[in-house]
Amino acid sequence: MIVSAYTHVGLVRESNEDNYLVLDLGPGVPGRLLAVADGMGGVEDGEVASAIAIETLRSRFGGRRTSGFNDPSGTGYPSYSHLLREAFDEANRRIYQHSLARLGHPGIGTTLTTLLYVEDNYHLAHIGDSRAYLVRNGTIKQLTDDHSLVGEMVKNGDLTEKEAMRHPHRNILTHALGTEERARVDVYEYEARPGDVVCLCTDGLTGVVGANEIKQVIAESEDLSTVARKLAQLANQRGGHDNVTVVVARIPP
């Protein structure tokens, strides 16, 4: 898997509350972990929340060996989904406790979209409105659902993608990491194929750039670092009202 990542503060905000991760799994476990996180709760707290989420993933998955994946919990339950859920639960607990200590109540949180590529499969865990896309055979598919008010409206057929991008309540999340005692996390599994391109991104991109435009930029360049930078630049050309983070990866043909 070939990977490139790029993040930009945008043209309006003074600090970047986004974070991302590109991590080799470790000896004996060929594969990668990719993640993007978009913090919420104010400048400092948003940065802290997304950083906690990313560092939790790094500490749990960095340097793992084959045995750690065969039995992730020590209970005979061999599941990549179990590993991801455990990591999300720990990050949720840490952010929730930070919020209680700092504010006296919940309120600090982050999105977190994570893709674990191992054994020719994608294992995804997701909460919030950051997204994962798959580009395959000239088509693009959104792999995750947006946990937001407008995301629910799009899912129910009440809004189109373009209408959702302009909706006044598009930034209101229904689920986020750290805002509740228990995280409501979606877990998915997809088969990986040679030639696939996956794109993880925060809503600083998807709020102003449509899925077909993302597909077009990916199709125009073999250089993934160019792809990631061009997508961020496109978001900035359309106002740059939010931080933008893009992680793109290709499975060699």
Image (cartoon, rainbow, N blue to C red):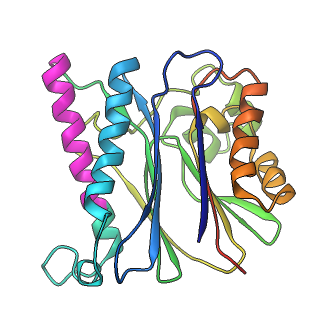
Residue 121 painted magenta? no
Residue 226 position, x and y percent, is 75, 49
Residue 35 position, x and y percent, is 46, 52
Task: Say if 100 sits above or below 225 in the image.
Answer: above
Residue 206 position, x and y percent, is 66, 39
Residue 100 painted magenta? yes
Residue at left offset 29%, top offset 67%: 83
Task: Say if 161 sits above or below 132 in the image.
Answer: above
Task: Say if 71 sits above or below 241 in the image.
Answer: below
Q: Quadrant of residue 53?
A: top left
The answer to whether 143 appears left or right of 33 in the picture is: right
Main SS of the magenta part reads helix
Considering depth in this image, is 129 or 112 the residue closer to the camera? Answer: 112
Residue at left offset 66%, top offset 32%: 207
Query: Could one spot residue 143 in this view of the protein?
Result: yes
Considering depth in this image, is 128 or 245 the residue closer to the camera? Answer: 245
The answer to whether 133 appears left or right of 239 in the picture is: left
The answer to whether 104 appears left or right of 80 in the picture is: left
Residue 12 position, x and y percent, is 62, 15
Query: Could one spot residue 42 in this view of the protein?
Result: no
Region of the chain picked out in magenta, as a range: 85-104
Q: Quadrant of residue 13?
A: top right
Residue at left offset 38%, top offset 80%: 29
Task: Say if 7 sits above or below 125 in the image.
Answer: above
Residue at left offset 73%, top offset 81%: 253
